[in-house]
Image (cartoon, rainbow, N blue to C red):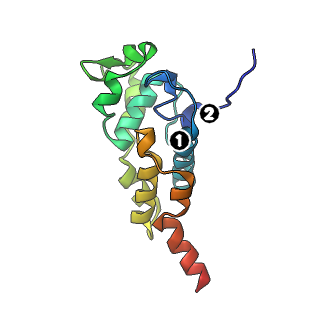
């Protein structure tokens, strides 16, 4: 068997995680999601979604980024149905341990996480990260759009002064 994709679980987006949504695998928006996770790690010094358990990973995403869109949950792949109950993520009811619950509950919202570590340009960085970490792959920034984002433009302008 030849492995076609190498990935770090904590960097996987919603579209890859257990083929959660519609059975789609890797695509370029998945890389954009990973870049968003890496930027948060560079900002905070910690892995954004530090877990190896799938339901916990999804719960962490909801904690940091807000609820998973209902339309995405309704179209979930049959492998992922065990993580969904009554049209929403089966959390905390489906949590496997108390440590898992604590790991999710200790996470701050994305805006708060960034503001804990960045004093200037926090608003621009939050806007960039929201574009990189959009749940819907088609709503995620492209690489070109990310590089043209105000966060990077402002830093280029400062260097040219």
The picture quadrant where one finds residue 127 is bottom left
Towards the viewer: 26 or 119: 26
**Crowd around label 1: few <14 · some 14–19 · many ≥20 (10 Å):** many
**How far separated are the C-alphas under marks 2 and 1?**
15 Å
Q: Residue at x 37, y 28 (%)?
A: 101
Residue at numbered disc 1:
29
Image quadrant holding the N terminus, namely top right
Q: Residue at x 30, y 29 (%)?
A: 71
| Position of residue 93 measured from the top left corner of the image (x, y, whole percent) | 30, 19
| Position of residue 151 measured from the top left corner of the image (x, y, whole percent) | 49, 66
Q: Secondary structure at mark 2?
A: loop
The correct choice, above or below, for 33 with respect to 53 in the image is below
Q: Is residue 14 left or right of residue 34?
A: left
Residue 132 visible somewhere in the drawing: yes
**Crowd around label 2: few <14 · some 14–19 · many ≥20 (10 Å):** few
Towards the viewer: 70 or 115: 70
The picture quadrant where one finds residue 55 is top left
Image quadrant holding the C terminus, namely bottom right
Q: Residue at x 36, y 22 (%)?
A: 75
| Position of residue 121 measured from the top left corner of the image (x, y, whole percent) | 44, 68
Q: Count of labels shown? A: 2
Residue 99 visible somewhere in the drawing: no
The correct choice, above or below, for 27 with respect to 4 in the image is below
**Quick one: label 2 or label 1, which is nearer the N terminus?**
2
Residue at numbered disc 2:
8
Q: Residue at x 50, y 21 (%)?
A: 18
């Amino acid at each position: 068997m030849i492995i076609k994709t190498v990935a770090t679980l904590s960097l996987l987006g919603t579209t890859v995680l257990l083929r959660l949504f519609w059975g789609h695998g890797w695509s370029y928006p998945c890389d954009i999601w990973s870049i968003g996770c890496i930027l948060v790690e560079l900002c905070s010094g910690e892995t954004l979604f530090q877990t190896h358990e799938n339901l916990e990973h999804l719960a962490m995403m909801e904690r940091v980024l807000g609820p998973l869109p209902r339309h995405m949950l309704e179209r979930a792949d049959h492998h992922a149905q065990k993580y969904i109950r009554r049209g929403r993520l089966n959390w905390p009811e489906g949590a496997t341990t108390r440590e898992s619950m604590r790991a999710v509950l200790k996470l701050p919202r994305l805006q708060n996480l960034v503001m804990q570590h960045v004093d200037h340009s926090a608003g621009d960085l939050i806007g960039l990260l929201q574009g990189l970490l959009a749940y819907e792959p088609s709503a995620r920034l492209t690489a070109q759009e990310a590089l043209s984002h105000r966060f990077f433009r402002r830093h280029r302008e400062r260097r040219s002064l």
